[in-house]
Amino acid sequence: MTNLLIGEYEHTLDEKKRISLPKAFRTGLGKRVVMTRGLDNCLFVFSREAWDTFAMKMQSLSFANADTRGFNRFMLSGAAEVDVDGVGRILIPDHQKSFAGLRKRVVFTGVSDRVEIWDAERWGTYKRKIDRNADKLAQKLGEIGAL
């Protein structure tokens, strides 16, 4: 199992589209990561190990189903392998920066086996919505036996 990635960190995107990975995430992610379009207009960042596990799950789904094909295309075609440089920075590809609407202030969130990269303003809006609905979400998860 990969390291548990947790926490929230704000950083600044430089003019060359580079950003420093939070130190707390560097060990768990490694020197080469896979970054792709995520849900809710953020980016997902996986270690190679976590990406391989995720990709295998995607490959096991039937391509006869249109929703499966669409989701595979969304996740896999938007992916890029990214090197972490000697000082812990990654370069965000243009298509991913545009997809996530990243501007200067960026938030990294640890979400178990992946890190998400959000535009800080978009993250604030999303987080307030989730905070307001946390009790309802917990109840729904309890009803399906997840909690």
Image (cartoon, grey):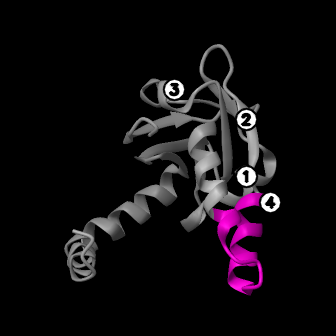
| Mark 2 → mark 1, Cα distance in angstroms | 12 Å
- Residue found 42% across the figure and 35% down from its top: 3
| Mark 4 → mark 1, Cα distance in angstroms | 11 Å
The magenta segment is 58-77
- Mark 3 or mark 1, earlier in chain: 3
Q: Is residue 101 visible?
A: no
Is label 2 or label 1 in front?
A: 2
| Mark 3 → mark 1, Cα distance in angstroms | 20 Å
SS label for mark 3: helix
Displayed quadrant of residue 93: top right
Q: Name which residue type carries label 4.
A: Ser
SS label for mark 2: strand
The residue tagged 4 is: 77
Query: Is residue 137 left or right of 117 when viewed as pictured?
Result: left
The residue tagged 3 is: 26
The residue tagged 2 is: 82
| Mark 3 → mark 4, Cα distance in angstroms | 25 Å
- Residue found 47% across the figure and 46% down from its top: 113
**Position of 14 relative to 56 (above/below):** above
Q: Name which residue type carries label 3.
A: Arg
- Mark 2 or mark 1, earlier in chain: 2
SS label for mark 4: helix
Q: For the residue carrying disc 2, how many other residues have a C-alpha within 10 Å: few (<14), some (14-19), or many (20+)?
A: some
- Mark 3 or mark 2, earlier in chain: 3
Q: Name which residue type carries label 2.
A: Val
Q: Residue furthest top?
A: 86
Would you say residue 124 sits in the magenta stretch?
Answer: no
Query: Is residue 31 left or right of 23 when viewed as pictured?
Result: right
- Mark 4 or mark 1, earlier in chain: 4
The answer to whether marks 4 and 1 mark residues whose Cβ atoms lie closer than 8 Å is no
